[in-house]
């Protein structure tokens, strides 16, 4: 009788062991499922966070214009509209020039320096000059000082390349207006930032620009990247832009954007409008991509270092305009 009881005990023990194994497997499977669900949840949360962050970054660059400093419909006159910002440390890396090196920094906009009629004359000058060649991409430049003109994927010197034909494109009156406008812009910057205008010097590059929506062909056509003028061009201390066409009617896109830490702030171009600012990293900026039409402007740059000064452009000797 003992043997049957032992067999029954053995059978009972085996049954209990099988039950424990099944329970253990079930627990492990449940634990694995719960861990997998937890990991999936964490991944979903992470993806959501990165997705939102990425969307916010792209939006901040491309479409989230937080504040319009000056709209195209406004007339800023007689006094410029000035926005003060704290000067960056950029200027400490360069020799300081008392009476010129920025002690107070900022940005300003005025519609009282250049008339709309003068802007139209300068635009026609730019159109005639750029009609000689032009970039194959969306951005072309004409520099009357150096003679540089976009031609396909490169640049040519208009004075050498076209020779006497220049007299049929530009006139002495064109160059005189250009010089007068430069002087007025220089005076406006000096007054706004409390500078001695005789200690400011025109510097390179100073040029006409024509921008449209044509696809970029070279890096010279990629005008929309954020940049700092003092870093890109070490000689720059003050940058100005004279707009020769109207946002909204001559072109869309193409607004000038100051990229501050807490917001993007934009200036809408208007023919005859001058926007100017200190050139350090306190004024990180970019130009919005032009989506339609053609945007014309002149970049006029100033330095405090006389070693980087350039002269006003003049008609080459032997040409008659």
Image (tube, helix red, strand yellow):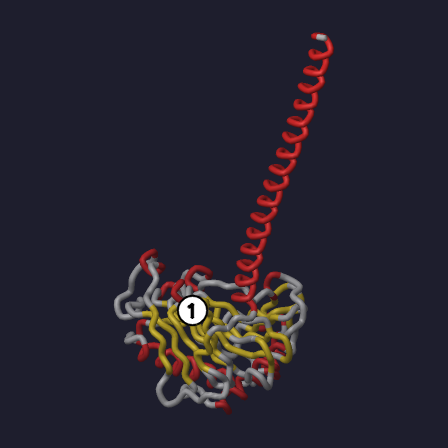
Q: Nearer the viewer, residue 182 or 239?
A: 239
* Residue positioned 40% across, 62% down in the render: 281
Q: Nearer the viewer, residue 84 or 53?
A: 53
Specify the farthest residue to the left: 98
Residue 90 position within the rendered picture, expressed as x and y whole percent measured from the top left: 36, 59
Secondary structure at badge 1 equals strand
Quarter of the image for residue 161 reads: bottom right
Task: Read off the residue under disc 1.
Answer: 203
Is residue 320 in sight in this rendering?
no
Locate the C terminus by quadrant.
bottom right
Mark 1 nearby-residue class (10 Å; few <14, some 14–19, many ≥20): many
Residue 11 position within the rendered picture, expressed as x and y whole percent measured from the top left: 71, 18
Quarter of the image for residue 216 reads: bottom right
Residue 29 position within the rendered picture, expressed as x and y whole percent measured from the top left: 65, 36
Residue 96 position within the rendered picture, expressed as x and y whole percent measured from the top left: 29, 62
Specify the farthest residue to the front: 1
Query: Would you place residue 247 above or below residue 37 in this image?
Result: below
Q: Viewed as shown, does residue 262 lie left or right of 60?
A: left
Locate the N terminus by quadrant.
top right
Q: Viewed as shown, does residue 315 lie left or right of 4?
A: left
Q: Viewed as shown, does residue 254 lie left or right of 74?
A: right
Query: Would you place residue 77 above or below residue 17 in this image?
Result: below
């Amino acid at each position: 009788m003992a043997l049957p009881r032992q067999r029954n005990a053995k059978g009972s023990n085996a049954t209990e062991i099988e039950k424990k194994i099944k329970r253990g497997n079930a627990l492990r499977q449940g634990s694995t499922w719960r861990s997998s669900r937890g990991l999936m949840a964490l991944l979903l949360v992470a993806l959501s966070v990165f997705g939102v962050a990425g969307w916010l970054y792209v939006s901040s660059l491309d479409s989230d214009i937080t504040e319009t400093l000056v709209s195209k419909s406004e007339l800023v006159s007689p006094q410029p509209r000035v926005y003060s910002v704290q000067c960056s440390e950029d200027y400490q890396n360069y020799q300081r020039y008392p009476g010129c090196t920025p002690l107070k920094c900022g940005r300003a906009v005025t519609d009282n320096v250049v008339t709309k009629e003068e802007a139209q004359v300068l635009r026609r000058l730019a159109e005639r000059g750029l009609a000689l060649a032009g970039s194959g991409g969306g951005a072309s430049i004409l520099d009357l000082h150096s003679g540089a003109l976009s031609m396909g994927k490169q640049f040519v010197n208009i004075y050498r390349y076209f020779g006497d034909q220049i007299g049929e494109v530009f006139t002495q009156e064109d160059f005189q207006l250009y010089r007068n406008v430069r002087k007025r812009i220089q005076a406006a910057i000096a007054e706004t930032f409390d500078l001695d205008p005789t200690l400011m010097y025109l510097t390179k590059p100073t040029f006409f620009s024509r921008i449209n929506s044509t696809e970029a062909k070279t890096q010279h056509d990629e005008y929309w990247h954020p940049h700092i003028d003092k870093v890109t061009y070490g000689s720059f201390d003050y940058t100005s832009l004279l707009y020769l066409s109207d946002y909204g009617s001559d072109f869309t896109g193409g607004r000038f954007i100051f990229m501050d830490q807490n917001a993007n702030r934009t200036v809408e171009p208007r023919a005859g409008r001058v926007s100017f600012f200190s050139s350090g990293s306190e004024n990180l900026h970019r130009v919005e991509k032009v989506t339609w039409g053609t945007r014309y402007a002149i970049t006029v740059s100033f330095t405090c270092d006389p070693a980087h000064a350039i002269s006003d452009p003049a008609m080459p000797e032997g040409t008659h305009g």
